[in-house]
Image (cartoon, grey):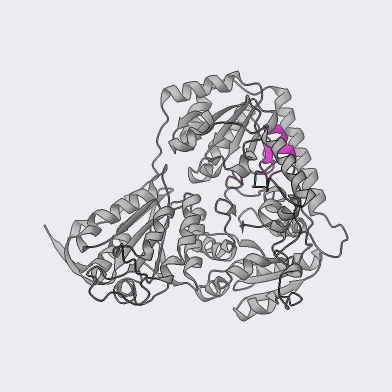
């Protein structure tokens, strides 16, 4: 057996380079690059190897470890989980900074490889710089914090372990049912140690998308349930994108006339002008679409984990509504006593459609979907139109970006008020062109995510919308995008604080407190951040606008710029696209505020409609 004597760090890099992904018949790198911030725990061994192989595995310099991880998660989503970025940090704070990003990838079922330095395996120099000591558990380091937020976790304590650990990590990240991030800890001494690795370990290996087929009896039960339904509806989730099942969803809906609603993760599974498209459902969805779902006697949930924002904390579905769930993940497919179809979304939709030959939804139910879609279009036209007000609303900003966007462009946002505004008011022009990180609802994802998405996208612009609160949390990747040459267009909506959570605070009977700048403790509440000046200092083209005409011009100009453009606009503090679907949060059972007591009473009434059982 021929061997190569390599360090553990070099073996890791060479193995990643050898992994290939087959996309549309073309073989491309599975790991097209890495994000890195070097420190003493990873620069001398892993950093050295990355330098030696920089042409095959290019390294992009991050500005924060969390931002690198968020960019990698967004890259994975934009590439439909077909390519994976590595993120590497030193030990200590560099590692813990990536834990939040790992949580984003974990919740959204996205593959990211996190590789962090670690304390010495020998423990002879302990305690080392940045090491957190656990006297009763000397083998514990901060890297153990990754365990709850990754699908695969390992610490390499001998160079030979690379041979088993890395293939297992890759297989887990590519598992269609249990996809998620992986973590590898590299103690500083082990990373530098040499070992005789088999040459065969570094031979190219091509990975293809695995499509597990559903069991025949599950398909038969689902077919019977669908045929018996009088008012069926399809929920399209993020799994439609990961399976690249949009054509099959389109064909199924057209052939059988079933109305389709989308989750936040599933948005842009269908174009907005599709005849069976009804709109977005859930707490951030449209009332018209939710009304259709509430009337349905059968829900076919495709590639969704049925999160509480989708189900209205399980108050949206009628008590006797049956649920058929198509999912590669068995736990997701069996939620709430669903009829499970455990298999790939694309294949399952095609097989169900074939077995439903000759069946279609009743004409009056199709018409009900048409009514809901028309109601959505009227709502969007009203919300995004020019109302002549002194400040623009979030919805008007969304409408302006939508008007300037093409079918090739990609729009991205995350936590706060923008998810609801985009979910309702963005009418998809292109398939797979929408990313709203609302699984972990991570503030700060928007800018780093736009950088990662810009790396993954090969056509069109990436438009990212961010609130002032999220901007202040994590903005340094504006410079990362300028430095790397991966351009995007960022629209900063400044409403003076954490306005959407203040909306919830007041909506549940509380008073405005510690959310808006105007009522924050301290003497500087009147001081406002100059986001235009700040982003300009980070190297971006910057413009501040005050009306719709200026916003349209700035968006059009941004296409012509050679680097990231930032457009800053003051928006109304509390002009929201309101929906009426219930969402369960904890409300005090006793309070001195009468409005809080009333909010609790109203919530208890809504909970009487909550669907019971897992």
Residue at left offset 59%, top offset 73%: 563
Counting from the top left corner in percent of width and height, residue 316 is at 66, 35
* Number of numbered callouts drawn: 0
Magenta includes 284? yes
Is 275 left, or right, of 204 in this rendering? right
196 relative position to 172: left or right = left
Residue 545 part of the magenta segment: no
Q: Position of residue 325 (x, y in %)?
A: 52, 32
Residue 133 placement, left or right of 532: left
Question: Looking at the rendering, which quadrant does residue 88 occupy?
Answer: bottom left
Q: Please tell me which residue lies in front, 263 or 283.
A: 283
Asked whether residue 491 appears in the rendered view, the answer is: no
Residue in the image at 59% along x and 20% along y: 359
Tell which residue pokes out farthest to the right in this image: 388
In magenta, the rendered stretch is: 266-293
Image location of residue 509, percent across then percent down: 76, 51
Q: Is residue 478 above or below residue 240?
A: below
| Vertical arrangement, residue 13 with respect to residue 177, above or below | below
Residue 35 place in picture, x, y as percent:
43, 68
Magenta span: predominant SS is: loop
Q: Residue furthest left?
A: 1
Corner quadrant of residue 512: bottom right
Quadrant location of the N terminus? bottom left
Q: In the image, 72: left or right of 476? A: left
């Amino acid at each position: 057996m021929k061997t190569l004597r390599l360090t553990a760090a070099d073996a890791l890099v060479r193995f990643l380079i050898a992994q290939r992904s087959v996309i549309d018949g073309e073989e491309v790198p599975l790991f097209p690059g890495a994000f890195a911030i070097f420190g003493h725990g990873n620069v001398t061994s892993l950093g050295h190897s990355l330098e030696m192989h920089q042409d095959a595995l290019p390294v992009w310099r991050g500005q924060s470890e969390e931002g690198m991880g968020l960019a990698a998660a967004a890259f994975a989503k934009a590439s439909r989980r077909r390519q994976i970025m590595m993120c590497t940090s030193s030990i200590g704070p560099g590692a813990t900074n990536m834990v939040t990003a790992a949580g984003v990838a974990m919740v959204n079922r996205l593959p990211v490889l996190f590789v962090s330095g670690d304390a010495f395996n020998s423990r002879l120099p302990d305690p080392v710089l940045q090491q957190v000591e656990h006297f009763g558990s000397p083998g514990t380091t901060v890297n153990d914090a990754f365990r709850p937020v990754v699908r695969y976790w390992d610490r390499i304590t001998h160079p030979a372990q690379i041979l088993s650990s890395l293939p297992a990590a890759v297989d887990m990240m590519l598992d269609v049912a249990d996809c998620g991030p992986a973590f590898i800890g590299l103690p500083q001494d082990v990373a530098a140690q040499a070992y005789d690795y088999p040459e065969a370990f570094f031979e190219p290996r091509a990975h293809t998308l695995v499509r597990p087929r559903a069991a025949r009896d599950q398909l038969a039960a689902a077919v019977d349930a669908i045929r018996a339904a009088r008012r069926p509806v399809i929920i399209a989730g993020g799994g439609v994108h990961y399976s690249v099942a949009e054509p099959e969803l389109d064909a199924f809906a057209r052939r059988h006339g079933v109305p389709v609603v989308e989750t936040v993760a599933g948005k842009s599974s269908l174009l907005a002008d599709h005849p069976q498209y009804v709109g977005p459902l859930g707490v951030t969805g449209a009332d018209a679409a939710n009304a259709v779902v509430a009337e349905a006697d059968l829900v076919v949930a495709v590639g969704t984990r049925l999160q509480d924002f989708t189900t209205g904390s399980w108050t949206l579905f009628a008590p006797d509504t049956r649920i058929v769930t198509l999912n590669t993940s068995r736990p997701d497919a069996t939620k709430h006593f669903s009829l499970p179809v455990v298999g790939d979304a694309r294949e399952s939709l095609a097989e169900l459609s074939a077995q439903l030959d000759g069946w279609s939804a009743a004409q009056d139910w199709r018409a009900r979907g048409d009514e809901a879609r028309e109601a959505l279009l009227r709502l969007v036209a009203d919300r995004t139109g020019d109302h002549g007000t002194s400040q623009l609303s979030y919805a008007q900003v969304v409408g302006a970006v939508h008007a300037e966007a093409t079918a090739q462009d990609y729009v991205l946002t995350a936590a706060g008020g923008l998810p609801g505004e985009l979910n309702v008011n963005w009418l998809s022009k292109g398939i797979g062109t929408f990313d709203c990180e609302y699984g972990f609802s991570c503030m700060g994802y928007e800018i780093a995510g736009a950088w990662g998405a810009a790396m993954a996208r090969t056509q069109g612009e990436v438009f990212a919308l961010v609130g002032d609160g999220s901007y202040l949390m994590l903005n340094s990747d504006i410079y990362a995008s300028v430095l790397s040459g991966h351009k995007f267009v960022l629209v900063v909506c400044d409403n003076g604080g954490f306005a959407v959570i203040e909306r919830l605070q007041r909506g549940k009977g509380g008073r405005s407190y510690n959310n808006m700048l105007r009522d924050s403790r301290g003497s500087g509440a009147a001081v406002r951040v100059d986001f235009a000046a700040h982003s300009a200092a980070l190297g971006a083209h910057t413009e501040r606008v005050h009306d719709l005409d200026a916003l349209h011009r700035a968006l059009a100009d941004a296409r012509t710029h050679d680097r990231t453009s930032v457009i800053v606009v003051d928006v109304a503090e509390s002009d929201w696209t309101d929906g009426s679907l219930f969402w369960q949060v904890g409300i005090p059972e006793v309070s001195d505020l009468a409005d809080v007591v009333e909010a609790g009473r109203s919530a208890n009434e809504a909970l009487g409609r909550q669907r019971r059982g897992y």
